[in-house]
Amino acid sequence: MVIGLVRHAFSIISLLCFTILCVCAAGCINPQSADLQSVSEEQVNDMNDALLPVISIVEDEMDSVTSSLWETARELDGIPADDPAVTLALYKLRSEIPFSIEIGRFDKNNTLITTTRYLDPWWVPGETKSRLNYPVEVLEAAGPCCVVSDFYQYQDGDRGLMIITPVYDANGEYDGVLRLSYDIDSLFSGLTEYLKNEYGYTLWAMHTTGLKFYDENTVEIGKYLTDDPEYQTPELQNMVNAVLKNQSGNISYPFYDTSRGEETQINAVWNTVDLGCEKEWRVVLTDSVPESTQTGRSNVTVEELKAFVENAYVYATKVGKTQALTAFNDPDGEFIDDELYVFAYDMNGTVLSLPYQPDLEGKTAGISRTQPG
C-alpha cells in the first residue's frame, strides 16, 4: 500500500513539474458534424498541456521497467535457471517495479522454472508453459526495449501486458526468457484520477492495431475499435482512423454514453507514447461538452507537494500501515493541510484512505487490477 501510494503521489509531482510545458496540436481535425459544437483553440491547448506530462510519465515509466528487466537478464546470463540466485534477482526486480504482478524465468522450451509467485495454480514451476511466445530473433532484435505485448488475457481471465527479454547460457546461447506481468491499469488509473480531479478530463489508450488496452470504463478494454460494432458509425470510425494515422491531434465526435443513457459530444486530443523498437501507444485525453465545472487549479508548489509526500512516506515507514492509515484518515490530523491530503487504495481497488469521503473507506473504487495467469 505505502509503495503504491508514494509512487502515485510522485506521479502527481511529475505532472505538476511538467505543467509549464506546452504542446501544439498536430493534425488538427475539426468536428465533422453540424450538430457538434466548435472547440476553442484555448481549450485544445489546455487539453494538450494536460496530456503532455502524462505522455512523459508513461514513457519514463515504461523505459524504467524495460531497462530494469533487461539489466536483470544480463546479470543472469550464464546462471542456470534453477539457481537460487535467479529467484533472489527476480524478487529484487519485483520490489523495484511496484506495478509488476509477477516475474518468471522460463527455459528455452518455454517452461516456467522460477517465479516470485508460488502456491498459484497458474504458475507451477516445471509445468507451466506460457501461451505467449515470440521467435528468438524477435526477442533479440528488441534488445533493451524488450518485447512489450499487446493487450494480454491471462489464464484466470484477468488482463495486462507481458514484457519479455531473452537470457543466455554461459556459452552465449539462447537459454529462455524473463517474463514480467505488468499492471498497466494501475499506471493509467492514477493518472486518470489526477486529471479528473484537477481538470475534469479522462484518459483511454490503444495500440496502433486499434486494440484499446486501457479505459476507465473496463467494459471498453479489449475492443478492436476498427471493427467493434459499437464504433461503426462514420463519426466514430473517422475518430479511430484519425487517432491511428496521426501521432497527435484533436477531434470532436458524438458518443452514446450508456451511463447517462444519452448521446454526448466528446472532445479529444491525443499523443503518442514511444516504447522504442518501432512500437507506439496512442493515449487519448477526453472532455465532454459542457466544459468541466472545475473551479480552479492547485496553488500548491512542487516543493510543497514533494515535502508533504516525503513526510507521509517517512511516517508510514516508521509506524506501519495500520497507524499510518489512521493518521491519513484523521480530518484533524497532520496529513490534511488545505488542498493536500493522502489517499490510498489496495491492489484490489479497495479504498484505504480518503479523508474527505470517509463513507467510501473499505469499498471498491472501481479500479480494475490485473492478476497473473
Image (cartoon, rainbow, N blue to C red):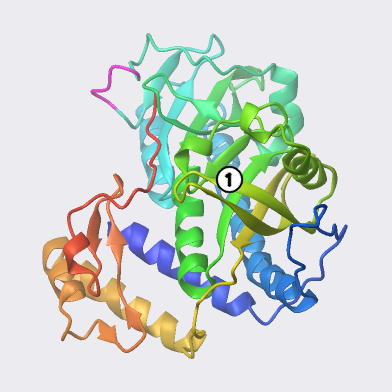
Expressed as whole percent of the image width and height from the top left, the position of residue 8 reads 42, 63
Rate crowding at label 1 as few (under 14), some (14 to 19) or many (20 or more) other CA atoms within 10 Å. few
Front-lying residue, 345 or 170: 345
The span shown in magenta is 118-122
The stretch drawn in magenta includes residue 154: no
Residue 160 picture location, percent across and down? 49, 34
Q: Secondary structure at mark 1?
A: strand
Dominant secondary structure of the magenta stretch? Answer: loop
Residue in the image at 22% along x and 75% along y: 315
Q: Residue placed farthest to the front in the image?
A: 35
Judging depth in this view, the residue of 138 and 287 nearest the camera is 287
Q: Residue at x 31, y 47 (%)?
A: 347
Q: Is residue 182 visible?
A: no
- Residue 7 visible at all: yes
Tell me where residue 316 appears, x and y as whole percent. Answer: 22, 69
Percent x, y for residue 138? 73, 23
Which residue is denoted by mark 1 in the rendering? 256
197 relative to 87 in the view: left or right: right
Question: How many labels were placed on the picture?
Answer: 1
Vertical position of residue 234 compared to residue 96: above or below? above
Q: What amino acid is found at the position of numbered circle 1 in the picture?
A: Tyr
- Image vertical order of residue 311 relative to residue 151, above or below: below
Q: Quadrant of residue 314?
A: bottom left
Q: Which quarter of the figure is the C terminus placed in?
A: top left
> Residue at position x 26%, y 49% from top?
364
Q: In screen coordinates, is 111 left or right of 365?
A: right
